[in-house]
Amino acid sequence: LQLGALPGWTGFIKWRAEEAGYEWQAAFPASLVKYLAIRLFYERELVHKACRTELGIAGDYTALLAFMQDQAHVHCLRHARVTGILNQEFTQKVDRLRYRIPRASQGAWQTLADHYSVSILENEDKESQSQASRLLSLASILQIEAQTLIDTAPTDLQVLLNWLDAFPETQHGPYWLQAFEAGYRTALLETLRPNIIKKIGATGPDQHQTAAVRPLTQAVLCIDVRSEGFRRHLEEIGGYETLGFAGFFAIPFRFQAFGSHHETDQCPVLLKPKHVVREVPRAYQSLEAEKHLAGKRFLQTGHQLLYDLKENVITPYVMVEAMGWFYLIPFILKTTLATRYREWASRLRRAFAPPLATTLTVNKVTQEEALEMLAVEQRPTIRRALREQLGLYGSQVSQELIETIRQYALGENDGPLPDTSRQALGLSSAQEAAFIDTLRRHYHIDSRGASARLHRITQTGFTLTEQVSFVETNLRLMGLTKSFARFVLLCGHGSTSENNPFESGLDCGACGGNHGMPNVRTFAAMANEPEIRALLRERGITIPQDSYFLAGQVDTTTDAVQLFDLEDVPSTHRHQLSQLTRDLEEAGRQNSLERCACLPDVQGPLTVKQASREVKSRSLDWSQVRPEWGLSRNAAFIVGHRYLTRDLNLEGRTFLHSYDYQDDPTGKFLQIILTAPGVVIQWISMEHYFSTVAPDIYGSGSKMYHNVTGRIGVMYGAQSDLRVGLPWQTVMNGEDPNHEAMRPLYIVEAPRDRISMLIQKNEILRRFFDGRWVHLVALEPEEGAFYHYVPKQGWSVVSQSTP
């Protein structure tokens, strides 16, 4: 009971206790045992105080038991008050006696208890009238005359009442839910049938199958429901084939962006990544990298200073008076000129920290490469130390001088610095030794720190064998093993919004709530490697020499697509790249137009240009509580060929995963799909379901009342439980649900016996399907017929509905 009193905080403490690598847990350990001990201590003290104040007894078990026996009428009324079964009149009377000073007499409690007993008898008479009313309502619904009830024997009427009692209104919900889910399932399957019939007709024995035309580009997008519309609009342009795949592209790793001190897990929380990928400047940008880091450090220092001033006990009082005007300027600009403000802020950031051309450390680094990466990290630190300790700037500090100082600080060279270096520094021997000591102690440029850092760097990247395995597995999982286009676009996704504590909920769930950019860049780098392709040929997958894997990311809020590592695109593909860029922009505009029609506060209908402006404006508006609908209204997961859903408007409600059952005779790849992305989809669906049906319990409530707490979550106002689940604005449209709460429907194009075998082998699939958490429908490929899985019984054919 104590742990369930505040489930949000309990869950957070449990998570902290299980995350040994969480830095705050290491610094300030917390556990459920300690939390429970604190709550029990305070409960004991409060019970003692309440018993002394209200009952005049000790707060122990013996005294409470004696009170309940000696003053049963007082206990009865107090218990009824706490459990909420008293009506308003008796609730007020009990409260008046409870809080009376001096304490109410036994006679007063006895009198109130007698009145309460009389009211119970009166309620029994009302209950008889209520039962008669129920029978009349039933007769009316069944179109039975009231006289028939009068002529019916009382024993038979009691049977009717017993039937009604056996099926109370509180139990109606599951049946309404089943009917609701069946309605959606029937409608979706009927929507898919024409495509199946067309496919069977095109590949029948008497039909000549035309040769496939090589597509202009094959675009692999995340299975996310928001990709469904974008894929459809891209295919409508012509020359494009699209596929669906989990947004982390089945490559789990930790990612560290250049200049960032933290790593992000780029995979579902089901997985624990063992590899690290780092973003590093390209070789020709070493000087620009130092400028970028210096500028970024300056911006971070200023940002941190403002936060420290705000969070200090004393300084906020002075800060409001002294710096209020400073906050007023961005406040006005962000409110009235959001787009312009973003442009100006972006220019300012670029001025301080110029953008860099970067690459990722995909390959396992050699010792020499690791040493160079370490040097690249240490040189800006030494330059900063020279500026802060000796006042040396810019041209006064050469690369040769920095490298010499670095080697001496690491102990690679003994004795004093060379004369030229000492002259450049203008230091005596004692000052030189003191500066080197400062580098080691305060800036951590020492042999011990370098050794630890070098060890972490050598854990970076993937071996050749690992890369081949990842690329082969992924291509087979998505059914892309032949007929490669000249461009294979690997498109992850992320989102952009302002003042949104739930922003990660709009990013890629398969990437751990992060942007998918690192994953697509990593996969593209692997797939473009000639040595990898040579090994793939030995395994039966031949990627043409002119096929190029391109990494991109779509912003689900603005529908804009950003392409990465364009400097690596071959010159032979530049013209097609320009065409691809234009088509992606057009698909994004059309998708924005479609999405705007579903946003409640958009005054439509809009033109394509107006829709593009609207979605961009929503991403910049810091007062916008709903920058996009996100995954609201998700309902189904379709695993199979694209022909099933091509040209169909599924209203952004379906997760789409490409799969070719013919390339998976053992069901190995289908098992991965159902137990990895399939699990994440079930989590997402249930999160939306419970946040809709019980928003006050399993949802986080309205964003209007949220306070970000400790940068770990949100609370309601100044004190509350740590709120879990999705906010009201994600699942509700005003007072009406936008998300249709139902259990997810999985439609799998594969033989039934293969799916049944996987269910028997996997406990998690048995919990999903036999436990009725997920509905399962199989599309039998050879028959073109749908079969519904009946838990623990088998398969039942789904009949085609008739108009």
Image (cartoon, helix red, strand yellow):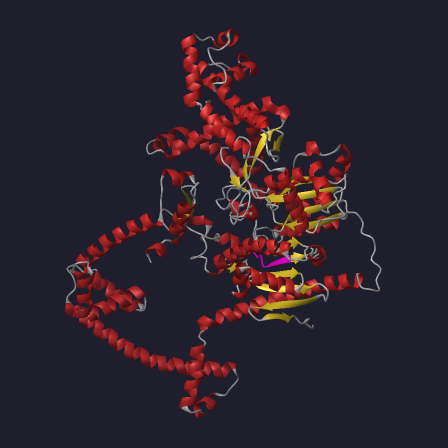
Relative to 111, is 662 on the left or the right?
right
Q: Quick one: quadrant of the C terminus?
A: bottom right
Residue 518 place in picture, x, y as percent: 59, 39
Tell me where residue 132 sits by quadrant. Answer: bottom left
Tell me where residue 573 sits by quadrant. Answer: top right
Residue 627 place in picture, x, y as percent: 55, 47
| Residue drawn at the location 53% of the way across and 61% of the way down | 768
| Residue drawn at the location 74% of the way across and 51% of the way down | 236
Q: From which residue to which does the magenta span run?
A: 632-638
Q: Is residue 352 above or below residue 155?
A: above
Residue 115 place in picture, x, y as percent: 23, 74
Q: In this view, does 40 lie above or below 67?
A: above
Q: In this orientation, which residue lies closer to the viewer: 726 or 393?
A: 393
| Residue drawn at the location 46% of the way across and 31% of the way down | 303
- Queried whether the magenta region covers residue 636, the answer comes back as yes
- Queried whether the magenta region covers residue 474, the answer comes back as no
Residue 37 visible (yes or no): yes
Q: Quick one: quadrant of the N terminus?
A: bottom left
Relative to 200, is 459 on the left or the right?
left
Q: Is residue 688 above or below residue 583?
A: below
Q: In this orientation, which residue lies closer to the viewer: 110 or 383?
A: 383
Relative to 422, is 42 on the left or the right?
left
Q: Is residue 117 above or below residue 403?
A: below
Tell me where residue 87 sits by quadrant. Answer: bottom left
Q: In this orientation, which residue lies closer to the viewer: 222 or 605?
A: 222
Q: In this orientation, which residue lies closer to the viewer: 521 or 420?
A: 420
Q: How many marks?
A: 0
Residue 210 place in picture, x, y as percent: 83, 55
Residue 733 visible (yes or no): no
